[in-house]
Amino acid sequence: MSEFLQQMVNGISLGSIYALIALGYTMVYGIIKLINFAHGDVYMIGAYIGFAATTYAQLGFFPALIISMAACAVLGVFVERIAYKPLRNSSRIAVLITAIGVSLLMEYVMMFFVGAEVRSYPKLLSERVFEIGNVYIKAQQLYIIATAIILMIVLQFIVHKTKTGKAMRAVSIDKDAAQLMGIKVDRTISFTFAIGSAFAGAAGVLVGIYYNSIDPLMGIMPGLKAFVAAVFGGIGSIPGAMIGGLGIGIMETLVSGYWNSMYRDAAVFAFLIIILILKPAGLLGKNTREKV
Amino acid sequence: MKKLLVLMLAFILVAGSLAGCGDKNANEDGTKELNIGINYELTGPNASYGEASVQGIMMAFDEINDAGGIDGMKINPVEIDNKSDSAEATSVATRLMTQKNVVACLGPATTGNFQATIPEAIGNQIPIISASATGDEGVTTDKNGKVNEYVFRLCFNDSFQGVTMANFASNNLEAKKAVIIKDTSSDYAKGLAENFAKTFKSNGGEIVAEEGYVTKEKDFMAILTKVKSKDFDVIFLPGYYQEAGLVIKQARELGIDTPILGADGFDSPVLLELAGAKALNKVYFSNHYSSLDKDPLVQDFIAAYKEKYNTDPGAFQALGYDLGKFIADAIQRAGSTKPEEIKNALASTKDFAGVTGSFSMDKNHNPIKSIVVIELKDGVQATSVKVEPK
Amino acid sequence: MRILMKKNLLILLCLIVTFVIVQVLIMNGIITRFHEITIATICINIILAVSLNLVTGFTGQFSLGHAGFMSIGAYVCAIINSRMDSTLGFLIGILAGAVAAAIVGVIIGIPTLRLKGDYLAIATLGMAEIIRVIFLNLKITNGAAGFSGIPRYTNWMWLFIFTAGSIILINNFIRSSHGRACISIREDEIAAESMGINTTKYKVMAFTIGAFFAGIAGALFASYFYFIKPDAFGFLKSIDILVIVVLGGMGSITGSVIAATILAVLTTFLQEFTAVRMIIYAALLVLIMIFRPQGLMGTKEITDIFKFGKREERLNGRRNR
């Protein structure tokens, strides 16, 4: 029993990390339907900025986190303006390829400057481990879970209760109509990118501290998993991203814990495909009826 | 906006091309030169291994060139990246051999990519040497067991390491039950795990569980929790320091305090950074040399490396350094820059003294090298035991 | 009918001339072993891109799993060819690899092709990952250590035959009534369905044909590069293929051919700039997409360019068929 509880703790904390990245992902995804492959790399750059701020400028956790979030927000808007905006009326796959180009560019510019070797993070947060029964819970796991939940609530609030959020939803439903209604489409999209990227930056710092390991290619797999989580939960749905992230984290953990860790990725994907076949718009996605 | 963008990207392109050209012309100072190909993983998932190896090689070449080169000829390293991709490795090897007039090719670092260049070496009759391709089969010998004439390596193979660690577990640690946690996506881990399991079982031991992870993974809690519920004496962890460091850290955090065994993939200062000193107790790994070795060759190398890069060298750097010295030595002994004679000199190596141990080449172009089993205490090398090859 | 004959003869002549010229250059040593590798990469990428273009560009189904089919072809051919070390074994290997890939294509296509857009992308991505993990754990494929010592039977002749064959066959498929049904699905699935087109059937058909040719490309790849490992067929490989298709223009065979050629030559050229090659490559990718978001060729084919202004004639020609 304690083993199962421990596995659930593992799964939830892994899932929260996916969710943390997927939340920013799904925002961007929801508004311009762009599979932003570069999101994982913004997360990587966030981790490095936090690393630089703490190692070279000797800052504490919160200043580093804020610097990283701000820098990533600027980076996100910059990328959007330069690479994605000119393509706003092109096919979605064209933008996807641009995103892949941006992603490669960020990875290898970073590798050019910092090298490919992994680096360890300064220890900024308490490394306490709580032992309840036979279950070990790290303080840092709690921080990550809490951050993911808080971010989800904040996002949900922004999207559903604020004026900007209303604009975002309008843009996501129909860009042209939104523009006609006096919504500044460009600014709304930039704002979305700023928020999404800032969250990616925060995730980068937190995950950097938690795993104590960062490298220029660290964004690829989490970026992919976040994409899967976002789609699994239902495109553009914020609680969906959270549930999708947690779901994938828990599935991965249970497969390695109770079946065979070597077939983990295959089993998780197989399960995902089955769920998608049964529920073709993801868990919380709205099944939009197509009009002729 | 578009204009700005064009300017910026154009700038990146120009700057990039210039940087590239800079590299290329750096060594042209008019003296007679000796082109040596460097075919390594400098981008892609294995970039850190390639980068480390090339650091070592370049250090060796700089020392040789500063001392006047080989018979007055300066070594000109021709460095091309293979993207950690086997098809690209083949293409790079061919480019080096047919377009760049190299007398020998060094690398790639991983067994698979090295294997992909073997047919080109044989076809073009230019020797290739890897310092870290430890795979057992199909490297220096072909599938019929015949030696590949132009293929060399200067590391021991996986079976030697796997067998040594299995014997170490059974004899020195008196372990009866072992758990294997391996990197399923790495050829290196696969070979080690198989050999460890075979020997450990024939020593009367039992493998109670075999778990896997993939390269670049960071969360091992699920498999460690599963393993923890089992009854075992040691964990064998074939894999590289990037993941091994995190596995050890997370295992210790979960309260698993059995000995953890590994191989030369552990040898990097990064292991300590990732796992932390507290976790690195009762950790044993096989390696080519130990930093405790009083041999001036070893100590001088460590000191010189530290001065240049400000950290300790790892196995890849040390092997790269030896590789650079080794090829220079062979060219010197051959007294010629003909690839065929260099090949003969390589094959007839006797007692080459390197940082990673002195060795001779056997008839299958594998070095006869002793292995060192190192124990870590609080993250530093505490004791080392030498094991001679059979 | 006569126009058609003349056109076909012309194409055949062009093909033979291309083949002979390159063959002579290879025999004279003007095209060295090294250039041959680039040529092989180009040919293999052309087959991959053209077959993915059929699925993504013409039928409009967003697939991120093409590398999975490629790996099936590669492994099947490698296993057969190293047991049967002869040209016959090589050909059997290619055929078996392609058929195996096609069978897997049908099995995967039937359930997943009900999904749309990004959901389909995830499903195909997932299935490619599943294939890769299976190869990673099978004994016969030698797992992560990779399959080495594959005899090289692929040469310019075979590359040429299979590349030209793939292009012609896929091109003919697209120009056939089946192909037009596929294009109608891309343009508007609901409209196509209401016109009585069995959309699932045509989607699966396009998917299977795509998988078949990806299998051929994989087999050629294995046989040319001596060594394959599961890592080489990860999702990044699928993305590489998608990049070629989009860069060339979705829905343009000519575009895929041109883009495959340009990218392979570019990659080879950039080998010289070790430190910055990926940076330059990525920057170029972004630049090209910004200036030609529809891809280099859009949906045009080379024949469209030559026939510019002769629309009347072309329509008449078509009617005569």
Image: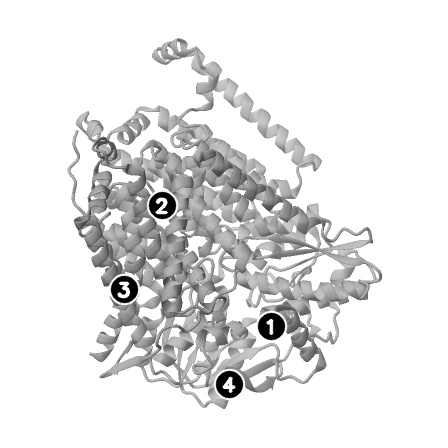
> Label 4 amino acid?
Phe
Q: Which residue is mark 2?
A: C64
Quick check: C187 left or right of B274? Answer: left
- Say which chain tag 2 marks: C
Q: Does residue B180 appear left or right of residue B264 in this picture?
A: left
Q: Does B175 sit left or right of A4 as displayed? A: right
Q: Going from the N terminus, do you reach mark 1 or mark 4 first?
A: 4
Q: Amino acid at mark 2?
A: Leu
Residue C311 seen anywhere in this rendered image of the structure? yes
Q: Position of residue A125 (x, y in %)?
A: 36, 73
Q: Amino acid at mark 3?
A: Thr
Measured Cα–Cα span from mark 4 to mark 3: 45 Å
Mark 4, residue position: B168
Q: Position of residue C178 (x, y in %)?
A: 30, 27
Disc 1 marks a residue whose amino acid type is Pro
Element under disc 3 = helix
Q: Are marks 1 and 3 on the same chain?
A: no
Distance from label 1 to label 4 (Cα)? 25 Å
Q: Nearer the viewer, mark 2 or mark 3?
A: 3
Mark 1 vs mark 3, foreground winner is 3
Q: Are marks 1 and 4 on the same chain?
A: yes
Task: Tell which subunit mark 4 falls on.
Answer: B
- Give the quadrant of the N terminus of chain A: bottom left
Whole-number angstrom distance, CA of label 2 to CA of label 1: 41 Å
Number of dots carrying numbers: 4
Q: Nearer the viewer, mark 1 or mark 4?
A: 1
Q: Chain of mark 3?
A: A
Q: Chain letter of disc 1?
A: B
The residue pinned by badge 1 equals B313
Asked whether the residues under marks 4 and 3 belong to the same chain, the reply is no
